[in-house]
Amino acid sequence: MISWLFIGLVITILLTPGPTNTLLASSGIQVGVRNSLRLIPAESCGYLIAITVWGVIIGTVSTQFPIVPTILKLMSACYIIFLAVKLWKTADIEASFNLPTIRPRELFCATLLNPKALLFASAVFPSTAWLSVNDYAAHIAMFLILIVPIALFWIFIGSVLASNKVRWLNQSNLQKTASIVLISFSIPLSYSAILSF
């Protein structure tokens, strides 16, 4: 069964600014929402491959070293806190979205190498997902469903930022909000890792 914590963590981490989301927003700025839709399958494939590979590695190693998933979960919680602090500190620094026109291949590569994939595989997906095909299929399907509206959101944000019509919708406010939400999700993640010891 898919938990609300899983859904909440996936949404929060996918919403967090990072390499993939920067490229989606850049595409929204440059070519608009409609022409950026072709990037969503590339993001989905990148995450599907990266999360699955990390998950299989974690599932294989954890049978011999059961402490590994707990350590990875604690490291992931620390990474989330680090990311939250970094987002807050850099919220008022102007981001550059003036990147060359983004192609699906470039977005796929950026997503494949995105550190969020390890975070998802080690801390967000339950350990049972790497031991049961049914659990894996249910969780990865939910993950892929959640990618679509969040990718659309980032593309839309890019198109709104390009038009400068909404004053409160800016990079600083987005990053500060994401920072607060990330901290709130790092607490239950840390707690569940500590309970595993």
Image (cartoon, rainbow, N blue to C red):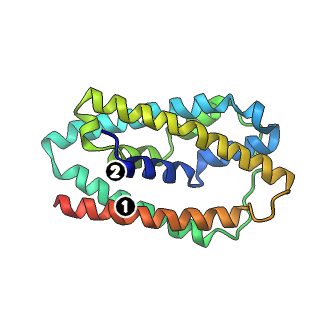
Q: Position of residue 194 (x, y in %)?
A: 23, 64
Name the one closer to the observer, 1 or 6: 1
The residue that disc 1 covers is 77
- The answer to whether any part of residue 23 appears in the image is no
As drawn, 137 above or below 51: above
Q: Which secondary structure lies at badge 2?
A: helix
Give the residue drawn at x 29%, y 36%.
129
How packed mark 2 is, by other alpha carbons closer than 10 Å (few <14, some 14-19, many 20 or more), is: many
Q: Position of residue 65 (x, y in %)?
A: 15, 47
**Quadrant placement of the C terminus:** bottom left
* First in sequence: mark 1 vs mark 2: 1
Q: Position of residue 10 (x, y in %)?
A: 46, 47
> Residue pushed farthest left?
64
Give the residue drawn at x 45%, y 67%.
183
Tell me which amino acid carries mark 2: Ala
Cβ atoms under marks 1 and 2 closer than 8 Å: yes
Tell me which amino acid carries mark 1: Ala
Left or right position of 193 against 22: left
Give the residue drawn at x 36%, y 31%.
138
Residue 46: which disc? none
Give the residue drawn at x 70%, y 43%.
155
The residue that disc 2 covers is 123
How packed mark 1 is, by other alpha carbons closer than 10 Å (few <14, some 14-19, many 20 or more), is: many
As drawn, 30 above or below 37: below
Q: Position of residue 82 (x, y in %)?
A: 46, 66
Name the one closer to the observer, 77 or 189: 189
Left or right position of 139 against 195: right
Looking at the rendering, which quadrant does residue 174 occupy?
Answer: bottom right
Name the one closer to the observer, 65 or 12: 12
